[in-house]
Amino acid sequence: MTITMVKAPAVSISGLTVAYKTDAGELPAVSQVDLELAAGTITGLVGESGSGKSTLALSLLGAVQKPGRVTAGSVVVDGIGDMAKLAGEELRTVRGAKIGYVFQAAQNSLNPLKTVGKQLLDLGKAHKVRDLKGLLRHAKDLLDRMGLNADRVLDAYQHELSGGMRQRVGIMFALVLNAHVLVLDEPTTALDMITQANILQIVRDVHKEQGLTTLVVTHDVGVVAEVAHKIAVMYGGRIVEHGPVTQVLAEPRHPYTRGLIHAIPRLTGDISAAKALPGTPPTLGTIPKQGCVFRERCALRMEVCETVEPPAQRMLDGRTVACHAVKEGAA
Amino acid sequence: MMTGFARRLAGHLTRGLVMIWVVTTFTFVLIRLMPGDPVQVQIERNIAMGMPPDQAEAAAAVTYGFVPHGPMWKQYLEYMGGILRFDLGVSVESQGVPVADRVLGAMPWTVVLVLTGILVSFLIGVVLGVIAAIKRSTVVGHSLSIAGSLLHGVPPFVIGIILAALFTRQWRLFPSGGVYNADEVAPGLYFDFIGNVLYHAALPAAAYALATYGGWLLAMRSSVASVLGDDFLLAAELRGLTSLTRFRYLARNAILPLFTVLAISFGLVFGGSIFIERIFNYPGLGMLLFSSIGSRDYSMMSGAFLMITVAVIVANILADLLYSAIDPRVRRQA
């Protein structure tokens, strides 16, 4: 895949820790995460529920919800600055205009009492768009290109749209103000197979046409294989493996990534070859305080895993892996 | 071809008329099953004065406008026929006065009272409810909720008695009864008269509002709290909408379910204002009903009940029409 985008900014997350206030004190949902979203790439962020991937995605918009807060680290977006430090009007005007966020289709991301068109005008006014007619034209253009009847959609209420239509409307809202960073939260969840394929095609297309840096958050490795250039695997609030999709999927190095990929049944071959990972992922309260967060479910568990958190090591092929058992090929 | 709205309205009106018929029939029967019969008392009094029984009955029939000992079905047919012509008979208590006149005369005062009371109560409740929901983990939120629950639990007449004692006896700031001061103003659509009417309605309306705003507060608080958890508000935040716009989204979605209850309560309160009207000596529909029950004034009772029934049904129809006007999910179903 060639990446030739000039407008797209790079996003660089470093040392990001996001903690939630609970009765047991502040517990980190995202811990010491370093992640680079290269300009113009699509990165797939994969993880099970509770792995912290949604929290990480929200931190890209400086929108970690209470009782959570960024306790350390930074999220620097080219041309904007550190999202973790922005506040007030500055933060508000960046959201939507510079960074777009698309909810999953099953979530009601539209005001049920207003038509899509009226909400589009609200968006325009909030961002002081002078040429509202132009905004409308741009929205219609985007909707048309995604294969929707734009006039009908703009005149519709949320309950009159199907899941696939809502997803496209969500993408339109995220991009209509020419944002160049796009975050998609579970873009294919709750959609049928054909709609999923359509949406992924649209994600690829708009990514290219608009010149975006895109983050796709999903629990579905298949989605990442389909659209992303890079994959970041998250477990217990850490990025355990990060690298080019083709290499990571072909030869996963971290035992969790391996387990994740081997859990997918193949179309050909023995169905029992697909093995579910034993155990359950940790929740906010059960993430180990020290040592490797994955050791409870790990086949390669060693003594060092109990006490020392594995650092992210850069491999020769450019990927990073955070595992004590992965040594060969380390740079 | 009827539009969805016309079909909906026609359906409501048909159901409403059937309801009115059922309720009037019930009241007709129930009232005649009540112990103590003023007509019988009158007949016996006539006999005691020396009239022969036939003449005594005829005299009573003239007074009350119906044949007391005619068969029930005949009385029923006469009664229903009367209703169709809006002839509700004559009052038993104040002899010869048509019930329809009394009921219609009392009605506007109740409307003034109830309308002011409910609107004030609704406004206070909704505003405080929003504050209680948004500040729900702070002292302000907790105190508002507690104040709402406490006052919600106190019956309206207790609050009424306290207000009446304080403001008409202790401090004499408000009149102790009546709907307007006939010595100061003459009825008409001008500022002084309307002011005088509101001045007289203020205390009973305040009593009603105080007794009921807690319900609105608690309802609005939970409605706002549930909308606050909706994804579209987070989505609006992530799209960079202003906090004012987001508040509008929140408020409109949260207040929607309360509008139905509001419209329905307009109907219910016609009957429910009895205590308030009695305590403040306010001659509305509630007072009329109260005194007619006391004096076994059948025709007046049926008239008041009929009025209350109609009010409840009309309020329900309005609630439904209002809801379909403000909620696109209902409006566009047809």
Image (spheres, coloured by chain):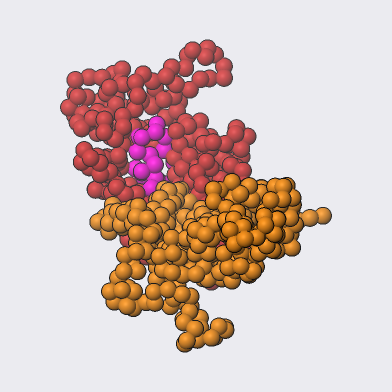
Chain colours: A red, B orange
Magenta stretch containing residue B257, yes or no?
A: no
Residues in magenta?
A: A35-58
Q: Residue at x 28, y 74 (%)?
A: B170
Residue A51 part of the magenta segment: yes
Q: Residue furthest front?
A: B50
Image position, residue A281 (x, y; %):
34, 27
Where is residue B284 drawn, in percent x and y? Answer: 52, 67
| Residue A15 visible within the image | no
Q: Residue furthest left?
A: A307
Q: Nearer the viewer, residue B85 or B300?
A: B300
Q: Is residue A123 above or below residue A308?
A: below
Where residue A178 appears, as percent x and y from the top left, is 51, 58
Q: Is residue B280 left or right of residue B193?
A: left
Vertical placement of residue B2 versus B199, above or below: above
Residue B63 vs residue B192, the one in the foreground = B63
Horizontal side of residue B323 vs A312, given as left or right: right
> A269 or B17, which lies in front?
B17
Instruction: State the residue at coordinates (57%, 84%).
Output: B188
User: Relative to residue A84, is residue A322 depicted above or below?
Assistant: above
Q: Residue at x 36, y 35 (%)?
A: A50
Q: Quadrant of residue A300?
A: top left
Q: Residue A184, how many percent across, how many down?
A: 48, 45
